[in-house]
Structures are given as C-alpha cells and as structure tokens.
Amino acid sequence: MNTATNMLNNATALQISPRLAKNIRRNFKERIIELILMLAALSAVFTTFAIVAILLYESFGFFKSVSLVEFFTGTQWTPLFEDAHYGIMPLIAGTLTTSFVALAVAVPVGTITAIYLSEFASHKTREITKPILELLVGVPTIAFGYFALLFVTPLLQKIFPELPGFNMLSAGLVMGVMIVPYIASVAEDAMRAVPMSMREGSYAMGATRFQTALRVVTPAATSGIVAAYILAISRAVGETMVVAVAAGQQPNLTFDPTEGAATITAYIVQVAMGDLPHASIGYQSIFAAGLVLFVMTLCFNILGHVVRKKYREQY
Amino acid sequence: MALPISQTKASVLENLDAVRAMIRRHKRNDIVFATIGLLALMLGLLTLLTLFVNLVMDGYPRFNLQFLSDFPSRRAGSAGLLSAWVGSALIMIVTFLTAVPVGVAAGLYLEEYAPKNWFSDLIEINVSNLAGVPSIIYGLLALGLFVYGLDLGQSILTAGLTLGLLILPIVIVSTREAIRSIPVAIREAAYAVGATKWQVVSDHVVKYSQGGILTGVIIGMSRAIGETAPIITIGALTFIAFLPPSPISDVAPYLNFEWLSSSFTVLPIQMFNWLSRPDHAFHINAAATGAIIIVVTLLMNGTAIYLRYKIRKNIKW
C-alpha cells in the first residue's frame, strides 16, 4: 500500500501526467486482485495441510498411550470397553472385505459397461445412458444404506437363511453397484482415447467388434482401465454410510462376507454418534483410525494417477 | 514351397465350411457381448429405479405436510422433519457462500493467472488429491479444527464450512473446465482494445463460463445436501426439537447471525437416526426422508446435466 501511495505522491510531485498516475493505480489494483485469487487457490493446499496436521496431532496423543506394535498387530479393537484393546486389524479386515465384495461386482460390470459404451453403443444410446450413470453417482449414500439394510439383506436372506441382519455381503454388493459409474466413466475415457486408425486396422483384417474391443482397444487402454480400478478401490475403502448402516458396528476379525463387521469408517461414525469427551483416548482413537484410512486412500489415489499418467500409451 | 493350383483350390474348398462356421461363431459372440453389455448398463439404472420405488412405497404413509412441519418425536407416527430440513437449508446457505467465491476464484487463478512452475503444480496436485479424500476425513478435520481448534462448536457454521471445503474441488474443477473452453481469441480481442487482465477475466472469461460454473455449483450443492458422514463426525445432534433463531429480525439491521452458532440436524442425519432404530415404524420415516432427499438431489443433478447439454449445444464460437 505504502509503495503505491509513495509512487502516487512522486507522480504528482514530478508532475507526471494524470494518465500515468492512473496507470499506476490500475496496476496496483491488478496486483491486489491476483493476490486475492492466489489466496483462494492456496485454500486447497491449506486444506490438505490442515487434514494431515490434525490427523497427525491427535494420533500423536493416541500413540502416547498405545504402542505402534499393539496398534498394527493386535487382533481386538475395543477402545470403548473397560478392558480396552487397540488392535486395528479387525477394522482393516472389515474394510478390505467390504471393498473386495464391492470390487467383485464393480470391476466386471464396470469394465463391460465401459467396453459396451465405447465400442458397441450407438451415439444415441450413449447420449441417453451416460447422464443416467451420472445420476447414479449423485444419489446420497445414506439412501443406498437403507437399500442394503432393508431391501438387499432380506432378499439375500431368502437365499441364505442363516445370513445375519447386519452383514458385509449386502453392504459390499450395494457399494459395488454404486462404484460402477466411476469405473465405467474412467475406463471409457481411456478406451475412447485409443485412435480410430487402430480399430480400422483391426476391422480391415476382418475382425469383429468384439475381437477388436478385446484384442486391440482393451490392451491399448490398459493403463486407464487399471487406474479406474485403483481409484475405485480408494472409493470403496473410504465409503462410509452404506457400511455403517448395513454391515454392523461390531469389530470382527474375519474375511467372511456373510458375517457382520465394522469398517474403519463405521467405527468413526459409531464413536461420533456417542458423546465422547474431547481429548479422551476414545476421541483420539478415531483420528488414529482416520489416519490409517487417509494413508490407504492417498496411496491408492497416487498410484492411480501415476498409472494413468506414466503408462499412458502415446499415439 | 508353392502347392500346385488344383491342390490349393481343394484345400480352400475343404476349409470353406470351417471358415464360414468361424465367422458365424464370431458374429454370434458379437451379439452375445452386446446383450451382456446392455444388461450391465441396465444394472445401474434398475438399481436406481428399485431403490427409489422401494423408498417411495415404504415411506408412502408419511407423505403429507404434517411430516414437514413436525419436530422429531419419540412416537414414530408424529415425528417430523421440520428441524432437519430447516437445518439443511441454513447449512446450504453457508456452504454456498464459502465454496462458490473461493472455488471460482481458485479456478480463475489456476487457469488465467498461475505461471507454469512448481508452485502452481503444488496447488493443482492438492486440488486433485482433495477430490479423492473420503468425506469422513473432512469430518475429522472439522472436528479437530472447527469444533475444538477454532471453538466454533457443533454449529451450523461448522457444518457449512465443512461441506464448503468438501465441495471446493468440484467447484474448482468445473470452473476450470468452463474457462478452458473459451477460445483465446476472445481474450486477445479484449486485450487489443486495452483491457487489463482483470477486466478481461471479469467482463469476458467469467461471463462466458457462467453456465459451466453454475453446473458445477449445482452438482456440488447436491452432493453437500446428501452428505452424512462428515456431519455425523462433527457430532451433530439427532434430536433437535427447536429451530435456530431466524436470520431475519424486525429491528435494524434486519439481519441476525445468531443462527450460525445454533446446534442443528440435517435430513440425512435424521434419516440415519431413524434407520438405526430397531422399531420398524421409524423405518417408514427413514424411507420417506430418503425419498425426499433423492428427489431433491436428482432434480438438482438433472438440472445440471440438462444445463450442460444446453450449453454444449448452444455455444458456437
């Protein structure tokens, strides 16, 4: 501010034309605007920094009373009980099991959808169905939770009568359908990026659409398709409401999807619904669990971006 | 080793049937896969349809005005959504006022101002990384930073800011996409008549990208309305039988900001609360709430998709 006023004073003192003085004022205003816009953009950096700082700070308090060895090797997670154990393994097992069930649905369905949309569907079909897939992404996850608990589980119980009311199978299946659009859209983008000439070469050799899709387009788009899978894993691991509602809230060290088990996210929800005093060990435990979740999703996200960027075939 | 012509002809004739069978088989594979593909595509649509019909049928008994004008209650039949939808609406105001200016400004900076260096790369990496952070982590951030760090408490302001941060990447990315589609010639024309950078940006770039930005804002806001996890993590209460103080007062300056620090509940949390009760009567309320949330978010998303379609169709540079 001072420099500007000084410059203005100098300008009048030196009898600089009013036009030049106006120019100086104008440049000053431009600088200020740029600075404000930059601060807004920096909010993204600030948010990331704040997330990491808060998670580390609160986890630090947690790890003062719990050893890292117990945290990662313990097989019981009961921070809120009288006889407290702090082994994160059961929560990780629940998270991985539900994610695995979800991917078992989403990977084949998503890939087939992507191939169909990119290689088989007419322009018109694509124009109509892509917005519908986008709508599916927009449905709040709590609604999917209701669907898993009160529609899919009773349906599954007709097939497997001994299935408990809270189980990872139905939560995983519903989550899988939820993730399909993510895989389909990223994988389809990768397939559409394969140049037309490669398809034409294949057709010229007498290959059918299916042969071209399977032997030419899919191999050429592998990096994009794999990136889609990795991003989908990250989505499944971080998904909260479906598992909190339908998979149960009891930590359970099992990889059997027909049992109920809490995931990392479900545990955080469960604790937050209760009334825990600030700075207690239970309060800190959700940040430690959150840190594990954050690191997991961060690794998958980075891996996904690296695969997509580094191994992209250049045509 | 060339074969005599007669022999080649014979072997071709012999193989012709095999070749024809192969072609038939491959053509059949094409049709089979196209059918499977169509079914895979339908799975999402059918799930969405089943989900919605299921919610509407389960929640049918509660579709009346009473449901919207009653406070939550211990008796399922007289419990309503009043405090939840008022809370959702007020939080959306805060979210809109924080995410839109900051997100659009950040998008403008990244597209129009940012030099190509490590600093801009750092910001860009952060934006794309934030888009992939699970929403519940934003809840933990808010719990540590807003609720206890800045001592804002479990208030409407905290929830609004949290959701604002959550949808910030969506607003930034859509702003950038909208800006990127504007041809350089428009900017050059403005510079040529002596406009400053900010004049170019505010009078031309922002003006032509309005539609695209609006699309992103609507999608972001619809995501914020349905978000449950981060708000639960903040520690929102589930039984709120009062309304926050009115934002409009009858004495000067006619605006009242006490509502920002009021405790609250929102639609998805109310639904989660009813859903986690064992009593089936409350599940009916949950279904009705779910149907309302879905209608609202689908309408918003539908508007955004339609808007984008319109913009793409109408723009002829």
Image (cartoon, grey):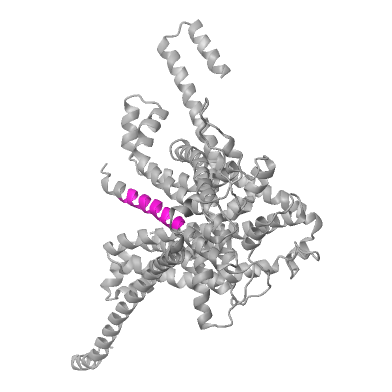
Depth check: give the residue in front, A244 or A224: A244
Q: Position of residue A157 (x, y in %)?
A: 53, 79
Where's the C terminus of chain A, which quadrant? bottom left
Residue B121 lies within the magenta run: no
Quadrant position of residue A83: bottom right
Report the predominant secondary structure element of the magenta stretch: helix
Quadrant position of residue A185: bottom left
Q: Residue at x 40, y 43 (%)?
A: B213
Q: Position of residue B187 (x, y in %)?
A: 34, 34
Q: Residue at x 59, y 82 (%)?
A: A162
Taking the image as shown, residue B5 lies to the left or right of residue B132, namely left
Q: Position of residue B160 (x, y in %)?
A: 55, 44
Q: Position of residue B234 (x, y in %)?
A: 63, 50
Depth check: give the residue in front, A195 or A65: A65
- Start-end of magenta stretch: B292-309
**Looking at the image, is B8 positioned above or below residue A235?**
below
Taking the image as shown, residue B148 lies to the left or right of residue B113, namely right
